[in-house]
Image: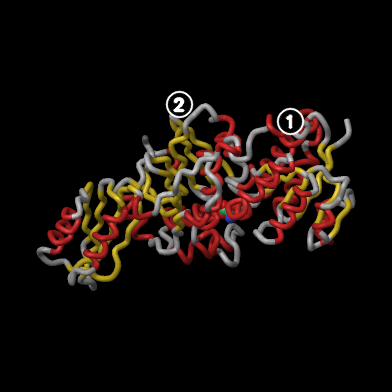
Protein backbone atom coordinates (compact mmCIF):
# COMPACT_ATOMS: atom_id res chain seq x y z
CA UNK A 1 0.00 0.00 0.00
CA UNK A 2 1.12 3.56 -0.69
CA UNK A 3 3.25 4.87 2.19
CA UNK A 4 2.02 7.81 4.23
CA UNK A 5 4.42 10.72 3.85
CA UNK A 6 5.79 12.54 6.87
CA UNK A 7 7.59 15.88 6.99
CA UNK A 8 9.79 16.25 10.05
CA UNK A 9 10.48 19.69 11.52
CA UNK A 10 13.56 19.47 13.74
CA UNK A 11 16.04 16.61 13.81
CA UNK A 12 17.57 17.17 17.24
CA UNK A 13 17.34 14.60 20.01
CA UNK A 14 13.68 13.61 19.57
CA UNK A 15 13.71 14.04 15.78
CA UNK A 16 16.77 11.80 15.52
CA UNK A 17 15.11 9.25 17.81
CA UNK A 18 11.96 9.33 15.68
CA UNK A 19 13.97 8.66 12.55
CA UNK A 20 15.80 5.77 14.26
CA UNK A 21 12.69 4.13 15.70
CA UNK A 22 10.72 4.43 12.46
CA UNK A 23 13.58 2.92 10.51
CA UNK A 24 14.39 0.14 12.98
CA UNK A 25 10.81 -0.98 13.59
CA UNK A 26 9.57 -0.29 10.09
CA UNK A 27 8.11 -3.75 9.54
CA UNK A 28 6.15 -3.92 12.79
CA UNK A 29 4.97 -0.34 12.43
CA UNK A 30 3.67 -1.06 8.92
CA UNK A 31 1.86 -4.16 10.17
CA UNK A 32 0.21 -2.05 12.84
CA UNK A 33 -0.59 1.03 10.78
CA UNK A 34 -1.73 -0.84 7.68
CA UNK A 35 0.70 1.02 5.43
CA UNK A 36 4.31 2.17 5.63
CA UNK A 37 5.06 5.45 7.39
CA UNK A 38 7.92 7.21 5.65
CA UNK A 39 9.75 10.42 6.51
CA UNK A 40 10.23 12.07 3.12
CA UNK A 41 11.46 15.52 4.08
CA UNK A 42 13.32 16.96 7.06
CA UNK A 43 13.72 20.60 7.95
CA UNK A 44 16.43 21.73 10.33
CA UNK A 45 18.56 24.83 10.63
CA UNK A 46 21.54 22.48 10.80
CA UNK A 47 21.42 20.92 7.33
CA UNK A 48 24.64 18.98 7.88
CA UNK A 49 23.20 17.33 11.00
CA UNK A 50 19.99 16.51 9.12
CA UNK A 51 22.01 14.88 6.31
CA UNK A 52 24.11 12.96 8.78
CA UNK A 53 21.13 11.58 10.72
CA UNK A 54 19.11 10.68 7.63
CA UNK A 55 22.19 9.32 5.79
CA UNK A 56 21.17 10.80 2.49
CA UNK A 57 17.92 8.82 2.44
CA UNK A 58 15.66 11.85 2.76
CA UNK A 59 15.37 15.33 1.28
CA UNK A 60 16.62 17.94 3.76
CA UNK A 61 16.04 21.67 3.88
CA UNK A 62 16.53 24.58 6.24
CA UNK A 63 13.13 26.00 5.25
CA UNK A 64 10.48 24.52 7.56
CA UNK A 65 7.72 26.44 5.74
CA UNK A 66 8.53 24.53 2.54
CA UNK A 67 7.68 21.32 4.42
CA UNK A 68 4.29 22.45 5.72
CA UNK A 69 3.37 23.63 2.23
CA UNK A 70 4.61 20.56 0.38
CA UNK A 71 1.61 18.87 -1.31
CA UNK A 72 3.40 15.50 -1.11
CA UNK A 73 3.34 15.51 2.72
CA UNK A 74 0.41 14.04 4.68
CA UNK A 75 1.59 14.48 8.28
CA UNK A 76 3.84 17.17 9.74
CA UNK A 77 5.81 16.26 12.87
CA UNK A 78 6.71 19.42 14.78
CA UNK A 79 9.73 18.97 17.05
CA UNK A 80 11.30 22.40 16.98
CA UNK A 81 9.76 23.63 20.25
CA UNK A 82 8.96 27.18 21.33
CA UNK A 83 5.65 28.84 20.78
CA UNK A 84 6.15 31.48 18.09
CA UNK A 85 7.54 29.96 14.87
CA UNK A 86 6.14 26.58 15.89
CA UNK A 87 2.67 28.14 16.14
CA UNK A 88 2.94 29.63 12.65
CA UNK A 89 4.17 26.35 11.21
CA UNK A 90 1.49 24.23 12.87
CA UNK A 91 -1.33 26.60 11.86
CA UNK A 92 0.02 26.69 8.31
CA UNK A 93 0.24 22.89 8.17
CA UNK A 94 -3.38 22.67 9.38
CA UNK A 95 -4.51 25.30 6.88
CA UNK A 96 -2.87 23.18 4.19
CA UNK A 97 -4.94 20.17 5.31
CA UNK A 98 -2.12 18.27 6.97
CA UNK A 99 -2.33 16.29 10.17
CA UNK A 100 0.12 17.35 12.86
CA UNK A 101 2.04 15.38 15.47
CA UNK A 102 3.78 17.52 18.06
CA UNK A 103 5.82 17.11 21.24
CA UNK A 104 5.43 20.80 22.01
CA UNK A 105 3.75 21.27 25.39
CA UNK A 106 4.37 25.02 25.57
CA UNK A 107 2.70 25.47 22.19
CA UNK A 108 -0.41 23.54 23.23
CA UNK A 109 -0.67 25.00 26.74
CA UNK A 110 -0.49 28.53 25.30
CA UNK A 111 -2.16 28.21 21.89
CA UNK A 112 -3.96 24.86 22.07
CA UNK A 113 -7.46 26.37 21.86
CA UNK A 114 -6.65 28.15 18.61
CA UNK A 115 -4.81 25.13 17.18
CA UNK A 116 -7.51 22.58 18.07
CA UNK A 117 -10.24 24.85 16.70
CA UNK A 118 -8.36 25.30 13.43
CA UNK A 119 -7.79 21.52 13.18
CA UNK A 120 -11.44 20.83 13.93
CA UNK A 121 -12.56 23.22 11.22
CA UNK A 122 -10.21 21.69 8.69
CA UNK A 123 -10.98 18.08 9.71
CA UNK A 124 -7.38 17.22 10.56
CA UNK A 125 -5.82 15.63 13.64
CA UNK A 126 -3.36 17.25 16.03
CA UNK A 127 -1.75 14.46 18.07
CA UNK A 128 0.38 15.24 21.11
CA UNK A 129 1.20 12.12 23.14
CA UNK A 130 4.88 13.15 23.23
CA UNK A 131 4.06 16.50 24.83
CA UNK A 132 3.48 15.00 28.29
CA UNK A 133 5.74 12.54 30.11
CA UNK A 134 7.70 11.36 27.04
CA UNK A 135 7.45 7.61 26.69
CA UNK A 136 4.49 7.16 29.06
CA UNK A 137 1.26 6.90 27.03
CA UNK A 138 -0.57 9.09 29.52
CA UNK A 139 -2.68 11.07 27.03
CA UNK A 140 -4.02 7.84 25.54
CA UNK A 141 -4.66 6.40 29.01
CA UNK A 142 -6.61 9.41 30.27
CA UNK A 143 -8.38 10.23 27.03
CA UNK A 144 -9.34 6.72 25.94
CA UNK A 145 -8.42 4.05 28.48
CA UNK A 146 -10.26 5.83 31.30
CA UNK A 147 -13.13 7.27 29.26
CA UNK A 148 -15.72 5.49 31.42
CA UNK A 149 -14.59 7.44 34.46
CA UNK A 150 -15.32 10.75 36.02
CA UNK A 151 -11.71 11.80 36.58
CA UNK A 152 -11.34 13.15 40.12
CA UNK A 153 -7.71 14.17 40.19
CA UNK A 154 -4.39 13.75 38.44
CA UNK A 155 -1.05 14.17 40.19
CA UNK A 156 2.24 13.69 38.44
CA UNK A 157 5.99 13.97 38.52
CA UNK A 158 6.10 15.36 35.00
CA UNK A 159 9.51 16.99 34.92
CA UNK A 160 12.49 14.67 34.95
CA UNK A 161 15.12 17.35 35.51
CA UNK A 162 13.65 18.52 38.80
CA UNK A 163 13.02 14.95 39.92
CA UNK A 164 16.69 14.20 39.29
CA UNK A 165 17.74 17.27 41.30
CA UNK A 166 15.43 16.40 44.22
CA UNK A 167 16.69 12.82 44.20
CA UNK A 168 20.31 14.01 44.35
CA UNK A 169 19.44 16.40 47.19
CA UNK A 170 17.82 13.60 49.17
CA UNK A 171 20.20 10.74 48.46
CA UNK A 172 23.48 12.68 48.60
CA UNK A 173 22.51 15.57 50.87
CA UNK A 174 23.43 18.01 48.09
CA UNK A 175 22.39 21.65 48.04
CA UNK A 176 20.07 22.73 45.21
CA UNK A 177 22.81 24.60 43.29
CA UNK A 178 25.19 21.63 43.36
CA UNK A 179 22.48 19.19 42.29
CA UNK A 180 21.51 21.54 39.45
CA UNK A 181 25.12 21.69 38.28
CA UNK A 182 25.21 17.89 38.30
CA UNK A 183 21.98 17.77 36.27
CA UNK A 184 23.55 20.16 33.76
CA UNK A 185 26.75 18.13 33.60
CA UNK A 186 24.74 15.00 32.80
CA UNK A 187 22.69 16.78 30.16
CA UNK A 188 19.32 16.67 32.00
CA UNK A 189 19.15 20.41 32.59
CA UNK A 190 19.62 23.12 29.99
CA UNK A 191 22.28 25.84 30.38
CA UNK A 192 19.30 28.09 31.22
CA UNK A 193 17.31 25.76 33.48
CA UNK A 194 14.49 28.22 34.24
CA UNK A 195 11.68 26.32 32.50
CA UNK A 196 12.44 23.15 34.41
CA UNK A 197 13.43 24.40 37.87
CA UNK A 198 10.72 27.06 38.08
CA UNK A 199 8.03 24.50 37.28
CA UNK A 200 6.99 26.06 33.96
CA UNK A 201 7.60 22.92 31.91
CA UNK A 202 5.55 20.90 34.41
CA UNK A 203 2.81 23.55 34.32
CA UNK A 204 2.55 23.28 30.52
CA UNK A 205 2.14 19.52 30.83
CA UNK A 206 -0.32 19.81 33.71
CA UNK A 207 -2.53 22.14 31.65
CA UNK A 208 -2.67 19.51 28.90
CA UNK A 209 -3.44 16.73 31.40
CA UNK A 210 -6.25 18.79 32.91
CA UNK A 211 -7.55 19.45 29.40
CA UNK A 212 -7.89 15.76 28.57
CA UNK A 213 -8.92 14.80 32.11
CA UNK A 214 -11.75 17.28 32.60
CA UNK A 215 -12.46 18.52 29.08
CA UNK A 216 -11.52 22.10 29.94
CA UNK A 217 -9.94 24.52 27.47
CA UNK A 218 -6.30 25.54 27.82
CA UNK A 219 -5.89 28.44 30.29
CA UNK A 220 -2.24 28.39 31.13
CA UNK A 221 -2.23 31.78 32.85
CA UNK A 222 -4.35 30.26 35.64
CA UNK A 223 -1.91 27.50 36.59
CA UNK A 224 -0.25 28.24 39.93
CA UNK A 225 3.44 27.57 39.38
CA UNK A 226 6.13 27.31 42.03
CA UNK A 227 9.49 25.67 41.34
CA UNK A 228 12.11 23.96 43.49
CA UNK A 229 14.78 26.65 43.69
CA UNK A 230 14.01 27.59 47.29
CA UNK A 231 14.01 24.06 48.66
CA UNK A 232 16.81 23.29 51.07
CA UNK A 233 18.40 19.96 51.84
CA UNK A 234 17.30 20.52 55.46
CA UNK A 235 13.65 20.59 54.41
CA UNK A 236 14.13 17.41 52.42
CA UNK A 237 15.82 15.76 55.41
CA UNK A 238 13.20 16.91 57.93
CA UNK A 239 10.42 15.72 55.60
CA UNK A 240 12.11 12.35 55.44
CA UNK A 241 12.37 12.14 59.24
CA UNK A 242 8.61 12.69 59.34
CA UNK A 243 7.97 9.92 56.77
CA UNK A 244 7.60 12.03 53.64
CA UNK A 245 9.39 12.61 50.33
CA UNK A 246 9.45 15.96 48.56
CA UNK A 247 8.46 15.88 44.88
CA UNK A 248 7.63 18.59 42.37
CA UNK A 249 4.05 17.61 41.56
CA UNK A 250 1.62 18.87 38.99
CA UNK A 251 -1.79 18.50 40.60
CA UNK A 252 -5.19 19.03 39.08
CA UNK A 253 -8.34 18.22 41.06
CA UNK A 254 -12.01 18.53 40.36
CA UNK A 255 -13.72 19.97 43.38
CA UNK A 256 -17.24 21.12 44.06
CA UNK A 257 -16.93 24.59 42.61
CA UNK A 258 -14.14 24.27 40.07
CA UNK A 259 -10.76 22.81 39.24
CA UNK A 260 -7.44 23.15 41.01
CA UNK A 261 -4.41 23.56 38.76
CA UNK A 262 -1.12 23.80 40.58
CA UNK A 263 2.56 22.90 40.32
CA UNK A 264 4.65 23.08 43.48
CA UNK A 265 7.00 21.09 45.69
CA UNK A 266 4.88 18.65 47.66
CA UNK A 267 5.40 16.35 50.63
CA UNK A 268 4.02 12.87 49.86
CA UNK A 269 3.96 9.94 52.31
CA UNK A 270 6.98 7.78 51.53
CA UNK A 271 4.82 4.67 51.35
CA UNK A 272 3.10 5.87 48.15
CA UNK A 273 4.57 4.30 45.03
CA UNK A 274 4.92 7.70 43.37
CA UNK A 275 7.03 8.95 46.30
CA UNK A 276 9.62 6.36 45.26
CA UNK A 277 9.96 7.50 41.67
CA UNK A 278 13.54 8.70 41.55
CA UNK A 279 16.16 10.09 39.21
CA UNK A 280 14.90 11.59 35.98
CA UNK A 281 11.88 9.28 35.76
CA UNK A 282 8.28 10.50 35.48
CA UNK A 283 5.09 9.08 36.98
CA UNK A 284 1.45 10.10 36.94
CA UNK A 285 -1.39 8.96 39.21
CA UNK A 286 -4.88 9.34 37.79
CA UNK A 287 -7.86 8.91 40.10
CA UNK A 288 -11.00 7.86 38.29
CA UNK A 289 -14.27 7.21 40.14
CA UNK A 290 -14.59 3.72 38.64
CA UNK A 291 -11.01 2.55 38.14
CA UNK A 292 -9.73 4.13 41.37
CA UNK A 293 -6.13 5.33 41.33
CA UNK A 294 -3.97 4.10 38.44
CA UNK A 295 -0.24 4.80 38.21
CA UNK A 296 1.82 5.29 35.05
CA UNK A 297 5.60 5.26 35.24
CA UNK A 298 8.43 5.63 32.74
CA UNK A 299 10.96 7.84 31.04
CA UNK A 300 9.66 11.36 30.57
CA UNK A 301 12.31 12.51 28.14
CA UNK A 302 15.11 11.26 25.93
CA UNK A 303 15.44 10.42 22.26
CA UNK A 304 13.75 7.06 21.95
CA UNK A 305 11.24 7.26 24.82
CA UNK A 306 9.84 10.47 23.35
CA UNK A 307 10.10 9.04 19.83
CA UNK A 308 8.00 6.12 21.05
CA UNK A 309 5.15 8.57 21.66
CA UNK A 310 5.70 10.46 18.40
CA UNK A 311 5.65 7.25 16.35
CA UNK A 312 2.58 5.93 18.19
CA UNK A 313 0.82 9.15 17.18
CA UNK A 314 1.97 8.63 13.59
CA UNK A 315 0.44 5.15 13.66
CA UNK A 316 -2.79 6.52 15.13
CA UNK A 317 -3.06 9.29 12.57
CA UNK A 318 -2.31 6.85 9.75
CA UNK A 319 -5.12 4.57 10.92
CA UNK A 320 -7.60 7.36 11.59
CA UNK A 321 -6.97 9.76 8.75
CA UNK A 322 -9.60 8.23 6.48
CA UNK A 323 -12.22 8.10 9.27
CA UNK A 324 -14.98 10.66 9.38
CA UNK A 325 -13.58 13.51 11.54
CA UNK A 326 -16.66 13.23 13.81
CA UNK A 327 -15.76 9.62 14.59
CA UNK A 328 -12.24 10.42 15.75
CA UNK A 329 -11.14 10.76 19.36
CA UNK A 330 -11.66 14.46 20.22
CA UNK A 331 -8.47 16.42 20.89
CA UNK A 332 -9.41 17.13 24.51
CA UNK A 333 -11.25 13.83 25.08
CA UNK A 334 -14.69 15.45 25.17
CA UNK A 335 -16.62 16.57 22.09
CA UNK A 336 -15.50 20.11 21.18
CA UNK A 337 -18.97 21.56 21.87
CA UNK A 338 -19.00 19.79 25.24
CA UNK A 339 -15.94 21.40 26.77
CA UNK A 340 -16.56 22.54 30.31
CA UNK A 341 -16.37 26.08 31.63
CA UNK A 342 -15.46 24.91 35.15
CA UNK A 343 -13.59 27.76 36.78
CA UNK A 344 -10.00 27.42 37.93
CA UNK A 345 -9.69 28.02 41.66
CA UNK A 346 -7.40 30.84 42.79
CA UNK A 347 -4.60 29.51 44.96
CA UNK A 348 -6.03 31.29 48.02
CA UNK A 349 -9.07 28.96 47.88
CA UNK A 350 -7.14 25.70 47.44
CA UNK A 351 -7.30 23.27 50.36
CA UNK A 352 -4.13 21.52 51.47
CA UNK A 353 -2.16 20.34 54.46
CA UNK A 354 1.14 22.10 55.11
CA UNK A 355 4.70 21.61 56.24
CA UNK A 356 5.93 24.78 57.94
CA UNK A 357 9.50 25.40 59.05
CA UNK A 358 10.33 28.37 61.22
CA UNK A 359 13.50 29.50 62.88
CA UNK A 360 12.73 30.56 66.43
CA UNK A 361 14.67 31.79 69.44
CA UNK A 362 14.78 28.86 71.83
CA UNK A 363 13.03 30.52 74.79
CA UNK A 364 9.81 30.01 76.78
CA UNK A 365 6.50 30.98 75.20
CA UNK A 366 7.53 31.04 71.53
CA UNK A 367 5.76 27.82 70.63
CA UNK A 368 2.69 28.92 72.57
CA UNK A 369 2.54 32.11 70.46
CA UNK A 370 2.89 30.13 67.25
CA UNK A 371 0.26 27.53 68.11
CA UNK A 372 -2.13 30.29 69.21
CA UNK A 373 -1.79 31.96 65.79
CA UNK A 374 -2.64 28.65 64.12
CA UNK A 375 -5.47 27.87 66.52
CA UNK A 376 -7.03 31.31 66.11
CA UNK A 377 -7.32 30.61 62.38
CA UNK A 378 -8.80 27.17 62.91
CA UNK A 379 -5.65 25.44 61.65
CA UNK A 380 -5.15 22.12 63.37
CA UNK A 381 -1.65 20.76 64.05
CA UNK A 382 -0.88 17.19 62.98
CA UNK A 383 2.75 16.89 64.13
CA UNK A 384 5.54 19.05 65.45
CA UNK A 385 9.31 18.62 65.70
CA UNK A 386 11.99 20.88 67.16
CA UNK A 387 15.65 20.70 66.19
CA UNK A 388 18.08 21.95 68.81
CA UNK A 389 20.17 24.93 67.73
CA UNK A 390 23.70 24.10 66.62
CA UNK A 391 26.42 25.05 69.17
CA UNK A 392 27.11 28.43 67.58
CA UNK A 393 23.44 29.27 66.91
CA UNK A 394 20.64 30.68 69.07
CA UNK A 395 17.71 29.71 66.84
CA UNK A 396 16.07 26.33 66.60
CA UNK A 397 14.27 24.92 63.56
CA UNK A 398 10.65 24.16 64.38
CA UNK A 399 8.73 22.01 61.94
CA UNK A 400 4.96 21.90 62.06
CA UNK A 401 2.70 19.69 59.96
CA UNK A 402 -0.88 20.94 59.78
CA UNK A 403 -4.14 19.24 58.90
CA UNK A 404 -5.96 20.37 55.79
CA UNK A 405 -6.95 24.01 55.71
CA UNK A 406 -7.62 26.72 53.16
CA UNK A 407 -4.53 28.38 51.68
CA UNK A 408 -5.69 31.89 52.60
CA UNK A 409 -5.78 30.87 56.28
CA UNK A 410 -2.23 29.58 56.17
CA UNK A 411 -1.12 32.75 54.32
CA UNK A 412 -2.50 34.84 57.19
CA UNK A 413 -0.97 32.56 59.81
CA UNK A 414 2.45 32.69 58.17
CA UNK A 415 2.33 36.50 58.04
CA UNK A 416 1.42 36.63 61.74
CA UNK A 417 4.14 34.11 62.71
CA UNK A 418 6.77 36.04 60.73
CA UNK A 419 5.78 39.18 62.65
CA UNK A 420 6.60 37.59 66.03
CA UNK A 421 9.81 39.09 67.47
CA UNK A 422 11.17 35.65 68.35
CA UNK A 423 10.90 34.37 64.77
CA UNK A 424 13.85 34.92 62.44
CA UNK A 425 13.36 35.37 58.72
CA UNK A 426 10.72 33.78 56.55
CA UNK A 427 8.58 30.75 57.30
CA UNK A 428 9.13 27.94 54.79
CA UNK A 429 5.87 26.45 53.55
CA UNK A 430 5.57 23.24 51.55
CA UNK A 431 2.17 21.78 50.67
CA UNK A 432 1.38 18.17 51.50
CA UNK A 433 -0.79 15.65 49.67
CA UNK A 434 -1.82 12.22 50.93
CA UNK A 435 -2.83 11.04 47.41
CA UNK A 436 -4.93 8.26 48.93
CA UNK A 437 -8.52 9.24 48.14
N1 LIG B 1 12.75 19.08 30.29
C1 LIG B 1 11.79 18.04 30.46
C2 LIG B 1 12.07 17.30 31.75
C3 LIG B 1 11.79 17.03 29.37
O1 LIG B 1 13.06 17.56 32.43
O2 LIG B 1 11.27 16.44 32.08
C4 LIG B 1 11.02 17.43 28.18
O3 LIG B 1 9.68 17.64 28.48
Q: Which mark is residue 290?
A: 2
Q: Residue at coordinates 77% horizontally, 49% vertically from top-left?
A: 95
**Image position of 365 with respect to 133: above or below:** below
249 over 175 or under it: above or below? above
Furthest residue to the left? 364
Say which element carries label 2. loop
Q: Position of residue 45 (x, y in %)?
A: 79, 63
Q: Tell me the number on the disc at residue 324.
A: 1
Q: Residue at x 45, y 34 (%)?
A: 287
Q: 265 or 226, which lies in front?
A: 226
The label nearer to you, 2 versus 1, is 1
Q: How many marks?
A: 2
At 55% from the left and 64% from the top, the residue drawn is 193
Q: Is residue 133 left or right of residue 63?
A: left
Label 2: few (<14), some or many (≥20) within 10 Å?
Answer: few
The CB of the residue at mark 1 lies under 8 Å from ligand 1? no
Q: Is residue 81 left or right of residue 138?
A: right
Label 2, label 1: how far apart the Cα atoms are: 30 Å
The answer to whether residue 137 is seen in the rendering is: no
Residue 345 on image: x %, y %: 40, 50
Amino acid sequence: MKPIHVGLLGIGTVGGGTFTVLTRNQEEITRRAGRPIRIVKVADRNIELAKQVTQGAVEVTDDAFSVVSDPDIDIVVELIGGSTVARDLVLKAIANGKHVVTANKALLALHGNEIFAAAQKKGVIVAFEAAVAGGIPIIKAVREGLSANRIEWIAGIINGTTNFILTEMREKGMAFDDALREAQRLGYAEADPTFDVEGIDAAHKLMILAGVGFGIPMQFDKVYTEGITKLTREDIRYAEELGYRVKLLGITKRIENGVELRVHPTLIPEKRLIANVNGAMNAVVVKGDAAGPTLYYGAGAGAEPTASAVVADLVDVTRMQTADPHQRVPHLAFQPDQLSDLSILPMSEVRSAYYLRLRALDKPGVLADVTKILGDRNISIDAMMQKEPADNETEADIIILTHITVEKNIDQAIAAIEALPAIAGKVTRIRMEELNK
